[in-house]
Amino acid sequence: SSELTQDPAVSVALGQTVRITCQGDSLRSYYASWYQQKPGQAPVLVIYGKNNRPSGIPDRFSGSSSGNTASLTITGAQAEDEADYYCNSRDSSGNHHVVFGGGTKLTVL
Amino acid sequence: EVQLVESGGGLVQPGGSLRLSCAASGFTFSSYEMNWVRQAPGKGLEWVSYISSSGSTIYYADSVKGRFTISRDNAKNSLYLQMNSLRAEDTAVYYCARDLGSGTQYYFDYWGQGTLVTVSS
């Protein structure tokens, strides 16, 4: 089955821009979706498809994709953006499974 | 307002069984595909199982295949996960999540708050 790889931890200075990446073969066939999870809370969808934000998600969150890599960009990171971020997509091996990346812990300095 | 509320978690001995429920409201449950996703303590998210809107199509992660059974009752707006032959490594918070997407994009747009399953003697 497919795997999605994320950097375990990333940090960004308050107000600066940060990119969180997700790599995997399945991303050549499917768009990644991105989830934000704060401690003790359920994941929240922040980006899906080519670059779509659900209602209520600030426009500082954006997504992009190239080849086998998907990226989540936060432009002007805020203190409240400190969280774990997970990517996921459908498995491209044909088994209709879903795969998640290992998650990236974002620290806002 | 879309709401997903899980229940049924608890402490169970290895080899035991547990049935999780997810009560849905605020949307036409019978029109949506659903999933179970779990998260072991301090670990990442792991997809567990998928069920189509009618219940006719089901998939499982290899780690639970043959032990877990997903089902739904559209008349009761409810999703279930029957977990048998539980192992210590099944210890996790279990989330139900609504599935959206088609073609090249698949995503979980709403999640419940989760229910904790602890497998321990």
Image (tube, coloured by chain):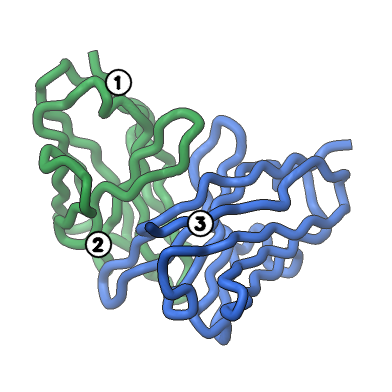
Chain colours: A green, B blue
The answer to which of A14 and B65 lies nearer the viewer is A14
Q: Mark 1 highlights which residue? A: A107
CA separation, marks 3 and 1?
29 Å
Same subunit under labels 3 and 2? no
Residue A102, image x and y in percent? 43, 41
**Residue at left 70%, top 69%?**
B69
* Subunit under mark 1: A
| Residue B62 figure quarter | bottom right
Q: Residues within 10 Å of mark 3 (few under 14, many from 20)?
A: many
Q: Mark 2 highlights which residue? A: A31
**Residue at left 32%, top 50%?**
A45
Same subunit under labels 1 and 2? yes
**Residue B48 badge:** none
Q: Residues within 10 Å of mark 2 (few under 14, many from 20)?
A: many
CA separation, marks 1 and 2?
25 Å
**Foreground: disc 3 or disc 1:** 3
* Subunit under mark 3: B
In the image: residue A7, left or right of residue A56: right
Residue A32, image x and y in percent? 28, 56
**Residue B4 badge:** 3
**Residue at left 49%, top 46%?**
B45
Quadrant (top left/top right/bottom left/bottom right) for the N terminus of chain B: bottom left
Residue A83, image x and y in percent? 35, 29
- Residue type, mark 1 in image: Thr
CA separation, marks 3 and 2?
25 Å
**Residue at left 10%, top 27%?**
A76
